[in-house]
Image (spheres, rainbow, N blue to C red):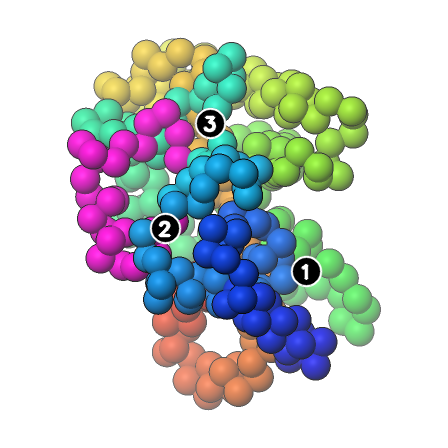
Amino acid sequence: MSDGAVDLKAEARARAYSIPLDEINVADPELFRTDTHWAYFERLRKEDPVHLHPEGHHEQGPFWSVTKYNDIMAVDTNHGVFSSEPAITLFDPDEDFTLPMFIAMDQPKHDLQRKTVSPIVSPQNLHMMEPLIRSRIQNTLDSLPIGKPFDWVDTVSIELTTQMLATLFDFPFEDRRKLTFWSDIATADLTSKLFKTDDPDTERKMYLFECVDYFTRLWNERVNAEPKGDLISMLAHGESTRNMDRMEYLGNLILLIVGGNDTTRNTMTGSVLAMNQFPDQFAKLKANPDLIPSMVSETIRWQT
């Protein structure tokens, strides 16, 4: 770690413990971009583990931070008191652009819709796909340039993730990068360079309607065919999903696209970064490949 990074974290720690509690904003993306969020969460756990961020200090408006495990579990397992509806984000959805999705639903609908698509990532199905996954990884890594700089995120992380997403959806392979784009558009801050106009909110909606229009064509093909093992066919034939309206279909599509893109892509990138930052851990891994499953879980936890 460079001296500059150490200084930045030291400054962040000093600030985290010096400002009033109600001025802490753990929703500030800059804390995560600079990897300086740790001290803020540490202080909240110590001094106010169920903390109200009040009106006035945060553009998101007032919100609660729950930072201890047992408290989090108490919230997460009691949907009767702590509902996920209509959204699980800090910002409330626009009234004219609400996207129902099962991650933002309570039981029983949440469980029923989740069970419709969960077979796609069952251990049995992933075991069947293992040869395909391995061959794609080998081909991608074997094609990397030697002795020349290249963009790991785009060439490896995004490409591999998007190939597998296309397979899970049985999505036209030549258009697979649309999946990455829609995922990025759905989650991007409105100041992102992805947006090319002066009205990024309208632009985002335009692209998401493009997404649901494309997938509606796929739905119409699958609903009139025999059920298959891809996600669109599962949704089209599922008892709890076959009657979704356009916005609920779009909401669940975004959930599945982002879910299939975000963690996998960032873990591939985060693992390479981690091995570079912590060469002793890389040496340990090379000496004992049996540690790889633990490394994957730890990377997911570490790189958020």
Check whether the beta carbons of the residues at disc 1 and disc 3 lie within 8 A of each other.
Answer: no
**Distance from Cα at disc 1 to Cα at disc 2:** 39 Å
The amino acid pointed to by label 2 is His
Task: Give the extent of the magenta segment.
Answer: 65-88
Check whether the beta carbons of the residues at disc 1 and disc 2 lie within 8 A of each other.
Answer: no
Which of the two discs, 1 and 2, labels the residue nearer the N terminus? 2
Closest to the observer: 203 or 136? 203
Task: Please give the label number shown on residue 92.
Answer: 3
Q: Which residue is mark 2?
A: 51
**Distance from Cα at disc 1 to Cα at disc 3:** 35 Å
x 57%, y 57%: residue = 32
- Crowding at dot 2, Cα within 10 Å, few <14 / some 14-19 / many 20+, comes out as some
x 18%, y 32%: residue = 80
Above or below for 3 versus 240 = below
Which of the two discs, 1 and 3, labels the residue nearer the N terminus? 3
Can residue 179 be seen here? The reply is no
Residue 113 lies left or right of residue 41; in this view the side is left
Pinpoint residue 218: horizontal percent, then vertical percent: 49, 19
Pinpoint residue 240: horizontal percent, then vertical percent: 25, 20
**Can residue 225 be found in the magenta stretch?**
no
Pinpoint residue 58: horizontal percent, then vertical percent: 55, 42
Pinpoint residue 293: horizontal percent, then vertical percent: 37, 69
- Crowding at dot 1, Cα within 10 Å, few <14 / some 14-19 / many 20+, comes out as some
Closest to the observer: 55 or 50? 55
Q: Which residue is mark 1?
A: 152
Residue 9 lies left or right of residue 164; in this view the side is right
**Can residue 87 be found in the magenta stretch?**
yes
The amino acid pointed to by label 1 is Trp
* Residue 176, quarter of the rendered image: top right
Can residue 42 be seen here? The reply is yes
